Amino acid sequence: MERDSAKSIESAKGAGNLVKYILKRLFQSILTVLLVVCVVFFLMRMMPKEYFFTEDELMKFTDQQKFSKLEAQGVMSICPTCHGSGLLESGEACPECLKYSTNLKKGTGYVDRSVFAQLGDFFSNMLEMRVFNAKGKEIKTIEPVNVWKWISARLKGESPFGELKEGYSPRLCFNLGRSIRLEKGQYVTDVIATKMSVSMEIGMISLAFSLVLGVAFGVLQARYKDRIFDHIGTGYTVIVNAVPHLVIYTVIMIGGASLLGLPMRYDATASDAWKTMILPIICLSIGSTAGYMLWTRRYMVDELNKDYIRLAKLKGLSDQKVMYRHVLKNAFVPLAQYLPYSILLTVGGSLLVERFFAVPGMGPELTNAISRYDLNLVQGIVLLYATLGILGVFLGDLLMTLIDPRIKLTGKGDVR
């Protein structure tokens, strides 16, 4: 009874420590993501104001139209000194907003907003209510409402959208602003969701292939160490890591098209769309397979040299049982730590592969957004990558504890 009671107390204490660790890591992760977003936001707001407009707008808009758009985006505000007139009561030009004007007799009526005020707007507007019809299509004519304003209005018994037609209903949406240049006028979240689904489909398939093949071949290399199969696998790993990926992709594309008749470009609208995915999936799997082969072989060889393996063989266990029941299980633990990270980052796609095969995914989107100075889209993609990266590392730690209960995330002083 006393032993059972002591075990239950120890188990409850361990569970409590694990919960504390999870909450602590989540808090640290949230702070890290917020820090990354704030840094990127400040860097984006250091760009000249011309980057908030498209090329057509820069040529066609008057100064007044440009200032009005910047005010709508929260970058500028009405001058509090002259209240937007550009003139003081004495008739002189307002000195506060004169620096933005080419007319020395009158100011523009607008002044810069604080970057901290803009950052506050970004976070406060991150959640908003939008109106959709029964078919799930957003009603563009009804302006979205900040979720905090919507809650405040509902608590007062008011409807911030007024009387809605039958079938119309408000929904909570994640808001990161609208694309300024690359996908002009579209919500950043919609752009990311569209691109993300394409990258994730190809990425998950290639990850599954590379994981199965890489681990299987790595096990065979470790089992037949210093034999012909091991030499072939090592040669493959060296070639993949030594030869530039663009050269490998070119060989695969030409070989696949000429020998197998596979399409050289991705096309989701084609009747045989699955065929257009084969070459991108192969190219994505090449490097990952080599990586899993290399690390599986390395970890298994390390395990094979340990004393408990020698003892298991002396007890009469067959090589097959030793390899799969003991060695592979322990060698897979370090690989498992990076598995959630790899799965989550399939969302981000591959810059080289997606450009090479014209895949409309997330891979080239960040570089395109940076080259076109699409500030809101850059912020949204960076936020996505930061969140997925930190979450992947966190889930990897938890997966290690599930595979190997001996690993404790907390110890003395709740330190890993």
Image (cartoon, helix red, strand yellow):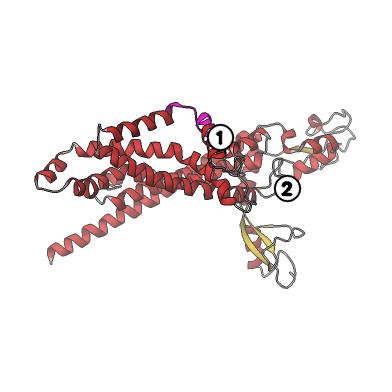
Coordinates of residue 165 in the picture (x, y in percent): 75, 71
Identity, as a three-letter code, of the amino acid under mark 2? Gly
Identity, as a three-letter code, of the amino acid under mark 1? Ile
Q: Which mark sits nearer the N-terminus, 1 or 2? A: 2
Residue matched to label 1: 254
Q: Which mark is residue 63?
A: none
Which residue appears at 70% of the width and 49% of the height? Answer: 186
The answer to whether residue 236 is above or below residue 37 is above
197 or 61: nearer the eye?
A: 197
Mark 2 neighbour class, 10 Å CA radius: few under 14, some 14 to 19, many 20 or more: few
Task: State which region is magenta.
Answer: 242-250
Mark 1 neighbour class, 10 Å CA radius: few under 14, some 14 to 19, many 20 or more: some
Relative side of 134 to 316, left or right: right
Which residue appears at 60% of the width and 44% of the height? Answer: 266
Number of labels in the image equals 2
Pick the quarter of the image with the C terminus: top left
Q: Secondary structure at mark 2?
A: loop
Q: Can residue 34 be seen from the camera position used here? A: no
Which residue appears at 56% of the width and 51% of the height? Answer: 274
Coordinates of residue 111 in the picture (x, y in percent): 75, 37
Pick the quarter of the image with the N terminus: bottom left
Relative side of 192 to 212, left or right: right
Q: Which mark is residue 185?
A: 2
Provide the major secondary structure of the magenta segment. Answer: helix
